[in-house]
Image (spheres, rainbow, N blue to C red):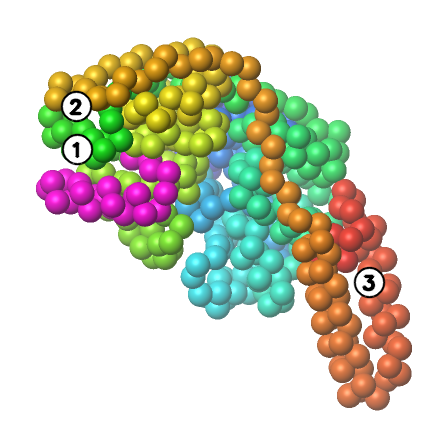
Amino acid sequence: MDFSSFGLIEPILRVLKESNYASPTPIQCKGIPPVLLGRDLLAAAQTGTGKTASFALPLLQRAAGRHSVQGNRVRVLVLVPTRELAVQIAEQVTHYGKYIPIKAAVVYGGVKINPQMMKLRGGVDFLVATPGRLLDLFRHNAVKFDQLETLVLDEADRILDLGFSDEINKLLALFPASRQTLLYSATYTDAVRGLAANILQNPLQLEVNLSNSVAVKVEQLVYEVDSSKKGSLLSHLIRSKGWQQALVFTRTKKGADRLASLLERDGISSAVIHGDKSQSMRSRALVQFKQKRARVLVATDVAARGIDITNLPYVVNFDLPKVAQDYIHRIGRTGRADCEGQAVSFVSADDVDLLSTVESLIGYRLQRQTEAKFEPATKVPISILRTLKPKKIKKNKQNKVANTDRVEVKAGAEKSRRGQKSAGSKKNQGRQGQGRNGQQNGATKGVSSPKKNRRR
């Protein structure tokens, strides 16, 4: 099978040919036809499977030749959990659609909002956004959703895991009920299934890769080492084995900064990204790493999903993640697009429980070894494989949410009363009008009533 068998138009096929896309991946084979037909979709797919193209290509085709959207309107909206993933998807959409007259934009927090408002002024066919910044733009009247045709939730499990459920619920109440909705998630947690049940209409369900699957061409190794020697071991491996590009994950932001400083002292060029870095600093660090001006990129799990680095050869778990599923997302940065890669984990005696959880998730024990002069003083115990329970998503405290709702509704009512008083209207008109709006929001599908009121 090739891409022409999907009935894709010539401008898209030309881009794919120029990009050396020989044949579609499994998620593309299963996902492109239903998206072209306008069906809702619930898809489980790991990173590095060609997921973005599976929805971008058919949605670009559907947008081609259509009338322009009006000012501040959006035709296709893609919601993602992180800035880095937003930028990556926007770049891919722009690339796939370079021979099609469409307008695409990306918005995210951590940068000035005014330039993003200007981008949306003329309307866009594709908007890639993080939930918080999109809400900010709506409150500034910079974006409207009455012409929204397709909503894509990418990395839905991560969106919920990062605490964006409130923002998602507020946004859903603003979207038209008649739309196509595509939901992609690496895992099917109860929270994801609940969200899917509320927002999808008769969806086609796809599961291309199991949530505990690791790319076949990723070699996984464990180095047993004392915690105090992990930094020295990393420097040694980089120099002795000639690693030219390695993505290294730490558990904390301070740990990432300390490790990068150690590597720099050892003469190994390094860059750092984590949540305390500004967007410009994070973007600069990624550019340095992709252009191989930095030999090592040290990161927290902010980069575990969505960062696409061509032919990345090495991923290092300097610290094992506390959540076993994050191990899959981390090492998914290598071994992409049928390339080979190596995932190395440093494990001390204190890490054995985390290692056991990871091995229980993937269903087998990882190969262990030691490096001369770095053997651990404390032996690392044998890990125990066990049955794992699905990870639950933290929910916001209801009382706190309710208080927030009351404050927002009260402020909105007060503003309405002031405006009407200055116009010489009766004071109760504002309350009546607000009640009608509340009823309209309450009719929005798939969102509970208290959360609907928050949309105002």
**Residue identified by numbered label 2:** 374
Q: Which residue is mark 3?
A: 437
Q: Nearer the viewer, residue 110 or 1?
A: 110
List the single residue furthest toward the front: 378
Q: Residue at x 12, y 45 (%)?
A: 265
User: In this picture, which residue range is highlighted in magenta?
Assistant: 248-272
Marks 2 and 1, the one that precedes in the sequence: 1
Q: What numbered label is drawn on residue 232?
A: 1
Can residue 170 be found in the magenta stretch? no
In three-dimensional space, the C-alpha distance between marks 3 and 1, rounded to whole angstroms, equals 62 Å
Q: Amino acid at mark 3?
A: Asn
Residue nearest the observer in this picture, 43 or 276: 276
Q: Earlier in the sequence, mark 3 or mark 1?
A: 1
| Residue in view at x 55 percent, y 65 percent | 121
Q: Secondary structure at mark 3?
A: helix
Report if the CB atoms under discs 2 and 1 are less than 8 Å apart: yes
